Amino acid sequence: MTLRMEQMAASVPAFVERYREQLEALEAGLRAAGGALARWSDDPTSGDERIRAAMAESPQPYATSFGEPPGTAIDVPPFAPVTVVAADGSSIEPDRFAAVSCFVINTGSVVLPYGLGGEPVLESRALLGPQDVIESSGEDEGADDLGPAGWAVNLRRDVRELETAAGLASRRVEHGDVVVLVDGTLFPWDLDSRQVPERVRRELKERTQDALDLLAVQGEGLSLGAYISGSRSSEVVTSLRVLAGDSTTAWPHADGHLFRTLLGDGQRSALFRAQSERVGRVEAMFTAPHQVCFFYLRVGDDVARVEVPHWATAQSRVARLHATLVDQCLRCGGYPRALQEAHEQAVISAGDRLQFSRLLESEARRQGLHAPANSKQMSKRRRAL
Amino acid sequence: MSDTPRVVEAGLRSYQCAYEGYCESPFSLGQIVAVREGPWPILGVVADAASGPEDPTRPLQARGGAGQTAADVMAANPEIRLLLRTHVTVVACGYVEGETVRALLPPTPPPLLARVEQATTAETVRLASDGAFIALLVRSPLCDDSVIAAAIRSAARAFEAGSRDFTVRAGKELARLLKAEPSRLTNIIRGVAV
């Protein structure tokens, strides 16, 4: 054991105590934020105006109201028959010590009909990439020479998740209502990352737009939610600080902290519109109907952020999403069952990673390729005294 | 989803086969089955069947409300059936070489992923007629008294009108094999007589 537990054990009590004191100090901030939220609910328009004015002077992310009084807590509507479609992804990042550098994206997907026709599906599809192993277009802003670092594995994975879910959902609407769930944010935020070559971003942006368009044309019977469990987002509390005009009180750092005190089990918050420089930058790549709205949902002790595109914010669609999410969470200890199973389909175990690495190494050797010797890596593998 | 199980672990004395998913009516205890792929068809007796989660790290929770049947719970949780598997353990007790059925261990195990099917009446009669296949079952640690009794009952059905004669022959073979274990012999004969 190299971590000296006796040293840690001596430090942990004081550390936890400081954390607890900080939480207690937030109580006043939570009360003040709750008061500001109530006033915002009384007059959402003027509250939104004050928030927009603050946005002009600060790069912080904010939220504005979106057709519902911001302080509303909405009870879970009755659950109705629905097919739940979900996708999640996992990846093997390029290994710079391997003879052949590559990545793997494994996309897990599920289709679970509840009281509707159609067969349930649990499946995964793996992709080996990049397609052009030694990529170089020469047209970029300098990011093309990043090699494997510029392959945008996370971004590709996010886009494939959305594409997979969209494809499956479009084939299920014939059976009745569909709720599509994706894990994480609605937009793949790396679309504006300078680490990703421009042409890769362009291609993946087009594919994201196509997937969202495919979902949008399925009609009123489809709801879409991007589910972020234990979100650390802070747009609402940042906005409330502006409305409270309070810069001295210890203020809650995350929206979830505030909504845990305001929402009962199964309740959702009002819809909000996400507003920030980065949101605007990524959203500007897409057509207006795909702009991001969100609400918070409390299930048990977890407060999840649920992002919804503008086109899916009709009351009936949000109600279906809300009821389905609560039902899904009840089936799976507080987290949507469909996302849990999609994750299980996607996850690449340590054994699978090792097996893939051996497969790649063996094929590279067969074709006369050898990994460049790397002393540090060799030393880690050897470990002999 | 196919309802024909396939060999997933193969040995000379026994093999495991699995259905693609959860099978509520797998091969029954003592049933005589055949793998017809590979150099020689291999005949065996079902010694065990078990169903459970495919991933042993994800145990099945006993969910479902009061009054809900298993079918109700499965319908309300459509993912569960896809995550379950049914496995069957088969003890090898003969193989076919040309026109001859030999009540001996096969020279090689069945091919992995080969289909496992019910043995035909003709195959069963040829395997069991002299009762010699019982010796392999008696010696197998996977076959307890219930398996042997069920296998004899299963084989007897194939003889139709001659089932009584077969059962008598099987009883004599058992008496020869188990003369040093009278209580085991009694248990098996009681099981055959059910």
Image: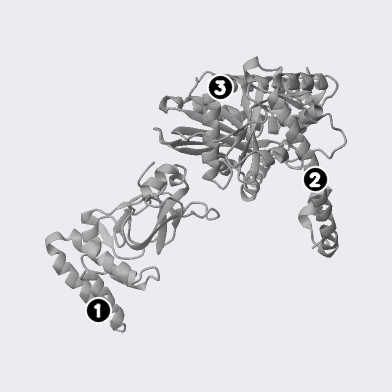
Q: Name the residue under label 3.
A: A314
Nearer the observer, A239 or A223: A239
Q: Mark 3 lies on which chain?
A: A
Hey, which quadrant is residue A230 in on the image?
top right
Nearer the observer, B44 or A165: A165
Q: Mark 1 points at which residue?
A: B175
* Residue B121 screen position, x and y as percent: 21, 55
Q: Which of marks 1 and 2 is in front?
A: 1
Where disc 2 sits, the SS reads loop
Specify the quadrant that holds the N terminus of chain A.
Answer: bottom right
Where disc 1 sits, the SS reads helix
Q: Residue at x 72, y 20 (%)?
A: A199
Q: Which chain carries label 2?
A: A
Is A44 left, or right, of B91 in this rendering? right
* Residue A191 screen position, x and y as percent: 72, 25
- Circle 3 Cα neighbour tier, 10 Å, few/some/many (<14 / 14–19 / ≥20): few
Q: Which residue is drawn at 69% across and 33% down?
A: A154
Give the amino acid at mark 3: Ala
